[in-house]
Structures are given as structure tokens and as C-alpha cells.
Image (cartoon, rainbow, N blue to C red):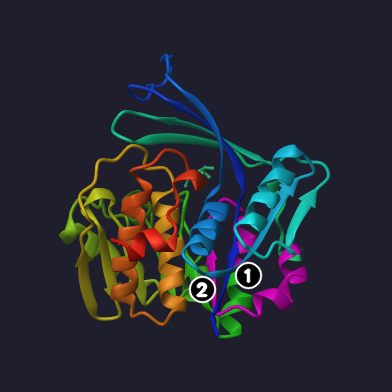
Amino acid sequence: MSKNIIVIGSCNTDMVIKVDRLPVPGETVIGDSFMMNPGGKGANQAVAAARLNGNVYFIAKTGNDLFGRRSVELYEDEGIHVGNIYSDSSLPSGVALITVDTNGENSIAVASGANKSLSPDDIRQAQSVIEKGDILLMQLEIPIETVEYAAQLASEKGIKVILNPAPACSLPATLLKNLYMIIPNETEAEMLSGIKVTDWESAQKAADTISRKGVDIVVITMGAKGAFVKENDNYYRVSVPPVKALDTTAAGDTFCGALCVALSENMKVLDAVKFACKCASITVTRMGAQSSLPYRKEIDQL
Ligand code: RIB
């Protein structure tokens, strides 16, 4: 029987402009194309996992508006269980403004809207669904007290709690102790460890420091370099297939969703990271967030 992956997190609508280079503060740059795409780190991770054959329950909050309703329809079309996506009557759905340069690098500003009202009470309401989970995946575009509450609830039930600490912020010690695995990128790893991550050696030092705070498995995603893994006393360096990046938006989200699917299929951590790297390498070759997420058959054909 396939295991259940619970994703708790944000949903946004992304407004994306392709530019030659990202504007510096105070500067206006003239862009090229404009796209409006479904996004949000939580939703991207839920959709990534569903497209890779995960059985996904998504717990989130939208505004009572067109963007929110359209998002929920899209998740249903992806086969995601949407019974615990709540609607806020006073706040709008989340929106992200994204610029993407010719190297595929992006800059993102998010107006959280209803994402910021996903509360511990909502999590209590979804408790019976969370308890059906084998893996709980979260990020930080929803209130930290909601993430803490859900992590505590799930870890008490023996559910593997995985946190993608994005966007970067410092984390309470109690939250870290409830995690099975943490998946920061280089910036987030620096925020959590105080160590600037530029190569495998600094990644190892950062992973050791984060791990000492109470998380046994630390996976640092390092863009085109790949991913560094610390699993208890074992260290692994996983490289990614070389690709031409068009848009790196949602590469990290793909990685997290894919890693959960692989773990739900009982792959070992190292094999799950290799699988996740392959999936993320496809995402960066396409524009947009959910529009760029790969399907399982594409990965199986690689
Ligand atoms: O990780 C990419 C996502 O970050 C975008 O889809 C945007 O909505 C922001 O949440």
C-alpha cells in the first residue's frame, strides 16, 4: 500500500517577468515576457510529489477569491487530497512577484495573504488526516507557530517530519528536535549554522553544526553543485546532471517533494537524494513553478 505524504504550506499565484538581469535596489529594468503561474512553496512541493506518484494530502489556506478557487481546482486535477484546504474570508490568496534573469536565477517577493492565517487551530482540525501520514513535509511560508505545532503533533505519532526551512529564518530549538530531516539550501544552511556554505567542506561543517541542534539527517541543496547529505555519522556528496538552467524557480520544491516520494517508496536516504537531484535538474530547464515540475514517467525514462 502506498504511504501517505502530508504537505502543510503555502499556495501563491506567481507573477513572473523574464529580464536580462535582476534589478538592483532603486533600479527599474525593462523585462521581456510576463507569465502568471500557480506557485507557493507548499503547493509546489505537494504538486511535485503528486506528479511523481506520491499519495499527497495538502493542508493550506487560500483567500475566498478567484486565485484561491483556481488553485484548489488545479491541485484536485493533480490527484491531491484537498479536503483540508481552508478559505479565509478576510485575506486574499497569496501572490508572489518573481523576476528571472538569463541565467535562470530569480528574485522573489511574496504577499502572504491567507497563508499567514493558517493557524494551529486549522492543524487541530486536520489532525485525523495528519495522523494518516507517514511523512509530513513543511516549509516556512506559513506562521512558525503552525509549523511548530504540526511538527510536535506529527513526531509524537511517529510520523517523519521533514522541514524545508525556506524562506530562511532562525528556528526554535524545540522545532529542530521534532524533525526527522531538514533540507536547507546554502543560504538557509548559513542562517542556521553561521557558516557560509560555498563548497563541500563548508557544507559538511554547516551540516555538523545544524545536526548538533538535534536533527539527525541534514541535506543541503547546493544548486548546480548538487546536494550534501549528513545522515547520522555518514556523509555523502551527490552531484546533479549538467543542464542549461532556464529558470531555477521551484527547483528546491521539486527536490523536497521528490525526496518525500522516494522515502515513501522505502528508498534509502542516499538513493532518495539522487532521485530528487534528477527531478530538480529537469525543473530548472523549464519556466515557472508548477508548470516546470516533472512527471514520474520523465524520470523513469532518464
Ligand atoms: O519556491 C518557489 C516559490 O516561492 C514560488 O512559486 C513563489 O510562489 C514562492 O513561494
Please report the residue visible at 42 percent of the width from the left and 43 percent of the height from the top: 249
Where is residue 101? Give x, y as percent: 35, 29
Residue 95 sits in which quadrant? top right
What amino acid is at disc 1? Ala
Q: Which residues are magenta?
A: 122-149
Local secondary structure at mark 1:
helix
Q: Is residue 55 above or below residue 167?
A: below
Q: Which residue is mark 1?
A: 150
Where is residue 120? Give x, y as percent: 71, 64
Q: Is residue 131 magenta?
A: yes
Where is residue 283? Give x, y as percent: 38, 49
Q: Which residue is mark 2?
A: 161
Local secondary structure at mark 2:
strand
Please report the residue visible at 34 percent of the width from the left and 56 percent of the height from the top: 189
Q: Is residue 112 above or below residue 210?
A: above
Answer with left or right where residue 195 lies relative to residue 53: left
